[in-house]
Image (cartoon, rainbow, N blue to C red):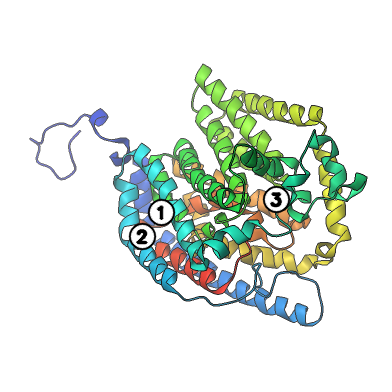
Amino acid sequence: MHVDGAAPAARRVSIGSVPESLRVTLSDVRVERVALAPRVRRAHFQGAALVLGAAALVVLTREWGLALERRGVVLLLGHAEPLMGPVRVRLNAETVRLIAVAAAAVVWLPNCCQRLAWRQLLAFSALGAGAWSVALAAVDGWQGGFVAKLTGKDEYLHDLYLVHGNVLRVFTGGIQGHDGLKWTTHVAGHPPGALLTFWSLARIGLSGAGPAAVFCVLTGALAIPAVLVTVRSVAGERLARRAAPFLVVAPAAIWVAVSADAWFLCVSAWGIAALAVAARRQDRIGDIQAIAGGLLLGLALYLSYGLVLLAPVAVGVVAVRHRVRPLFLGLVGVSCVIAVFTIAGFWWFSGVAQTKARVTSGDAGARPYTYFLIANIAALAIAAGPAAVAAMAYLRRARGLPRVGLLLWLPLTALLGLATADLAGISRGEVERIWLPFMPWLIVATALLPARQARFWLAAQLAVAIFVQTVVVSLW
């Protein structure tokens, strides 16, 4: 083909010699044309309006929550409504370094994500995400930002000494304190897989809060390549590269360092990625990938009960390819995990019922449904960041465009799961951490933002993360 604008004598270039990330397809051209069209310029204003609306919602839920607390209503948020934790401004040398890192990210991160080879980008995204979460947590130092978050009386490490014999057979009874065993808050609020993860780390010599904190940060960072692999499989490499900077420095990184939910994010993200990749293949390797994806998603069910609501995302990445076989094989993998835990003595549905009963009987059960129905949305907007909020305005505009329209499956199916959780009142507060496994699937919508606005929205993401980390003392 001839390069546009070249003389007729320009040499021919084989399309196979051009890197995939640099190829301009018809859909890419259409995306750029749409971005310049007057009707999509309206989306710019709609995106800004959504961000302003989200900011107003944050202020509203904060003032509403403080008013409820003054009346004695139980919220258990620590006065940082709609987020969880006390409010205390911290300004130190680490804050200055954090701002310097953010400035460097605005300048260089978008270019790096475009120019690196694909495999290099995957490694770079994990390293970048890990570095950003560590830089945020470092504001509180090693002890306050990492160790102390995992050594509280409500954390998993507190109950490791109770694990002996076949703990799965007695786990359900311990949720409400039966048979002389009572799990601490976080252990009781999750299936046994979460507790057994940290017990396994201790068994291989990685005991204590330090190794556990490193584990959470590393696994949370490793989730980002999985999300990029999924986006590439569903909608193409170009959109994956455009979303990469926003995934690396999302405000949600605050709760990656340090919470066990970062591990939950990693397992579920790679399970979905394996299914997405399997849906593109029709050979034995694809079958193995589908089963592996099912095994990972099955494991995710035994890390957090709420991850069952990621099912629409998992089904969606296969449905876009109009395939059934990967879904069937993925279900086989999930069933194998369920069978292992059930035979060992833990019935998932009994765990759900006992956990619900414990929450309902405690202070958390007194949290007002109506307030958290709204406040959860505000907390989600903070954690996903203003860029993700603004990107929601571009979803309808991208519908019907080749490849680009396929990207819509990811944020829309994630929103479906989150809406279900919110309406059901499953989580009343603390969703900036609890919903962490859902957030990357919302943030990928930032690939639809106009390229010329990328640095502006990236700076907005970084600014929100720095502000929240500086003002709110996160308990995770």
Q: Residue at x 35, y 40 (%)?
A: 120
Q: Residue at x 39, y 53 (%)?
A: 34
Residue 366, compared with residue 15, is above or below; it is: below
Residue 308 can be seen, yes or no: no
What is the quadrant of the C terminus in the image? bottom right
Q: Amino acid at mark 2?
A: Ala
Find disc 1 in the rendering and name its residue. 245
Q: Are marks 1 and 2 in contact (CB under 8 Å)?
A: yes
Depth check, mark 1 against mark 2: the one in front is 2
Q: Earlier in the sequence, mark 1 or mark 3?
A: 3
Find disc 3 in the rendering and name its residue. 156
Disc 3/disc 2 C-alpha distance (Å): 34 Å
Q: Residue at x 44, y 46 (%)?
A: 126
Depth check, mark 1 against mark 3: the one in front is 3
Q: Tell which residue pokes out farthest to the right in this image.
A: 179
Q: Secondary structure at mark 2?
A: helix
Q: Amino acid at mark 3?
A: Tyr
Q: Secondary structure at mark 3?
A: helix
Residue 6, compared with residue 458, is above or below; it is: above
List x then y, in percent, for residue 72.
Answer: 82, 79
Residue 305, compared with residue 36, is above or below; it is: above
- Mark 1 nearby-residue class (10 Å; few <14, some 14–19, many ≥20): many
Q: Earlier in the sequence, mark 1 or mark 2?
A: 2
Q: In the image, 99: left or right of 317?
A: left
Find disc 2 in the rendering and name its residue. 105
Disc 1/disc 3 C-alpha distance (Å): 32 Å
Q: Tell which residue pokes out farthest to the top in this image.
A: 284
- Mark 3 nearby-residue class (10 Å; few <14, some 14–19, many ≥20): many
